[in-house]
Amino acid sequence: MKKALIVLLVLATVLGTAFAQGGSEASQKTTTLMLSEVHAEGYPTTLADREFARLVEERTNGRIKVEVYSGGTLYGQETGAIEALQIGDLAFARVSASPVASYVPKINALQMPYLYRDGEHMWKVLNGEIGQGLLADIQTSGSGLVGLAYYDAGSRNFYTKKPVKSLADMAGLKIRMQNNQMMVRMVELLGANGVTGIGPNDVYSAITQGTIDGAENNWPTYESMGDYEAAPYFLLDGHTRVPEILLASESVMKKLDPADVQIIKQVAKETQAFEIQKWAEREQASKAKVVAAGSVVTELTSAQLAEFQAKMAPLYEEYGKAYKDVITAIQNVK
């Protein structure tokens, strides 16, 4: 009788442990979420996406796994990714701030030419009351999007076939611009001619063939596309600094445990510093390569930069009038 009782107790213990383990496994069920990225592997934002994924899985103890799809393999256009976020077909996407302005018009203020004194000024704005307020406005806009964090995309600068050392040197130059009327207007006010309709892959040939005298972009693009070989003069004017934004789907976030949503938001903020560092490293590597190849870099003095900024008065009236309060607040950030 005693042996039978001992056997029963052992069986009960084994079964109890099994049920406990089964319950534990059930509570640790993994939710897999997708993140869309149009940039290639190794690009600063893609590296930050993967760091975000790693930290989310680590901080949630494996409850949430984020799969990063880079190089546009999931959505080739950022607008497509945004639409997928809105209907809950996608959890996260790293996009430029530009298309997000369609839902929060005040974000257009961040795209104004010669708005910032330098990169430090921009980050004071983005991580301060103004930038964080705009990030919060994304979720309250009714767009179905959640703004998680800003990432760096560097500054756009002019590069040309002949030296440009001052505002006067811009006169008459044909500069390839994005298909953006405000940016075309910007270059016209500087005395040059904006040329659109040339894809990024065709800039090099357009310069060598004489169709254009130069273009504008950030350091990594100038280097990676080989444009520095055709236009070896780089003017570090930083005319625009449009940040990237890591977005989440509001409908997807609502399905998660609120505690995990807080972890996701916190992790996103933390990866900002990681991405900024990776961007700085990429910029330095690109700059070193083109300088070693013979490119000449010209930096504007404060007085020269002020001349470029002063030419933007008509543009600010035409394109920034509706966001004048935000623009003024940004300019006043010390």
Image (cartoon, rainbow, N blue to C red):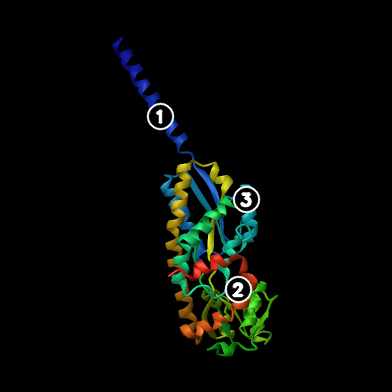
Secondary structure of residue under mark 1: helix
Q: Are marks 3 and 1 in contact (CB under 8 Å)?
A: no
- Residue 177 occupies which quadrant of the picture? bottom right
Q: Is residue 97 above or below residue 309?
A: above
**In the image, what residue type sits under mark 1?**
Ala
x and y, in percent, of residue 288 in the image = 45, 80
Residue in view at x 45 percent, y 68 percent: 333
**In the image, what residue type sits under mark 2?**
Tyr
Residue in view at x 51 percent, y 57 percent: 133
Secondary structure of residue under mark 2: helix
Disc 1 residue crowd, few under 14, some 14–19, many 20+, Cα 10 Å: few
x and y, in percent, of residue 228 in the image = 55, 82
CA–CA distance between discs 2 and 3?
Answer: 32 Å
Q: Nearer the viewer, mark 3 or mark 1?
A: 3
CA–CA distance between discs 2 and 1?
Answer: 65 Å
Residue extending furthest toward the left: 2
- Asked whether 334 or 2 is in front, the reply is 334
Q: Earlier in the sequence, mark 2 or mark 1?
A: 1
Residue under label 1: 20
Is residue 71 in view from this perspective? no
Q: Earlier in the sequence, mark 3 or mark 1?
A: 1
Q: Are marks 2 and 3 in contact (CB under 8 Å)?
A: no
- Asked whether 152 or 286 is in front, the reply is 152
Disc 3 residue crowd, few under 14, some 14–19, many 20+, Cα 10 Å: many
Q: Quadrant of the C terminus?
A: bottom left
Residue in view at x 65 percent, y 72 percent: 318
Residue under label 2: 316
Q: Are marks 2 and 1 in contact (CB under 8 Å)?
A: no
